[in-house]
Amino acid sequence: MKVFKITAICSAVLLGIAANGVYAQDNQITSNITVSQSQDFKDLNLNLSLKETANTNAFEVRNNGSDVTSNLTGKNIAVSLNDHGLKDNHTKDSTIFTGLRSSSYHSEGQGIDPLKVGSSIINVGDKNTDNINISLNTKSTNTTYGDGNNAVGVLAYKQYANGPKPNNNTNYQTNTQSGGVVNLNATNLNIDVQSKGEAVGIFVQNSTTQEKDASKLSTVNINAQSTHINTHSDTANGATCLYALSQGRIFANSGDLYINADNAILTRGNSLIEINKDKNHTVQLNGDFNFNYDAKTSGTDVDSTVIVNLSGANSFWNGNALTSYQADGKPEGDPCRSKA
């Protein structure tokens, strides 16, 4: 039995109305869904071909002041998004496309105390769900995206927007705001992300480094018997399967896990990624464990922990453990010291 626990000092940050979709003839939903009041969906089949960039989230639960939960149930749940209908050169800024997004987000001017924002939770599937399929393709040759287009299959996120921020105007301190949570429950979970820019399977960011209450941390829980995550980017080293920043947490402990990307894992900022805790499942990882430092967007040196149990003859990890940083952001000394 092979057991890996890797700890590294890294840091930084990456960056209502409940709307029903428009149904196509085959019962697919063909428009974005944004949930800002608790609402449930059965047999969700969301197939979105974007025509403009006012909303680049296929399905989002967005909390701006009270607890919001959305339960997606049924035998088969599918979310897909592509950019094939977008016009060329539509923006000067980077664009982020997401399949499922849980956001805890304060908007300036709405009269909401940013320290009292409630929870945002998406429960995807249950004990009766066979398949969850999430697919994004933002590689259209007919579109350009300024600084780049980034695609994320599942995003759990907490952010201070333009409102007041505690502790000397920094988002790297403890706050009382709950993070976004996504629970993925099915027999089979399949995530496939293709992008010109960064392509990420699961991305979790809590925007803190000192939060002590685990219940307030942005989290993705994978509870599937078999999980396949594949990402591909046209940008060098731009594909990542599990991405956790600033106390973000990812747990994949309930079944077999198969990953293919440049980076199987990319993390920083006192985050936690835990795989196969009970040591009873097959884990096959193709890609590096990348402990990333970004001076431009954070520069903070804090621990990030990755725990992986490779159990049985069929489990393997094909990659390297490394630290990385931008060409113009090399840390002084070595704040990304790793120890296995």
Image: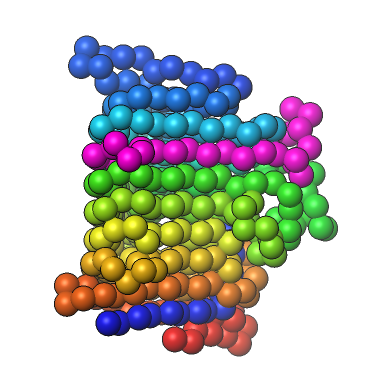
Question: Viewer-proximal residue, 207 or 122?
Answer: 122
Direction from residue 44 to residue 60 in the image, left or right: right
Q: Position of residue 209 (x, y in %)?
A: 66, 64
Direction from residue 186 to residue 216 in the image, left or right: right
Q: Is residue 3 visible?
A: yes
Residue 162 is drawn in which quadrant?
top right
Q: Is residue 232 visible?
A: no
In which quadrant is the C terminus drawn? bottom left
Up/down of 43 relative to 260, above or below = above
In which quadrant is the N terminus drawn? bottom left
Q: Residue furthest top?
A: 25
In percent of the image, x 65 and y 71: which residue is there? 300
Up/down of 20 relative to 87, above or below = above
In percent of the image, x 35 and y 44: which residue is there? 185
Q: Position of residue 265 (x, y in %)?
A: 39, 66
Q: How many marks?
A: 0
Up/down of 131 relative to 249, above or below = above
- Assign the magenta stretch its main secondary structure: loop
Question: Viewer-proximal residue, 180 or 75?
Answer: 75
Residue 335 is drawn in which quadrant?
bottom right
In percent of the image, x 74 and y 53: which residue is there? 175
Direction from residue 210 to residue 98 in the image, left or right: left
Give the magenta-colored segment's residue range.
Answer: 107-132
Q: Residue furthest right?
A: 168
Q: Position of residue 288 (x, y in %)?
A: 33, 72
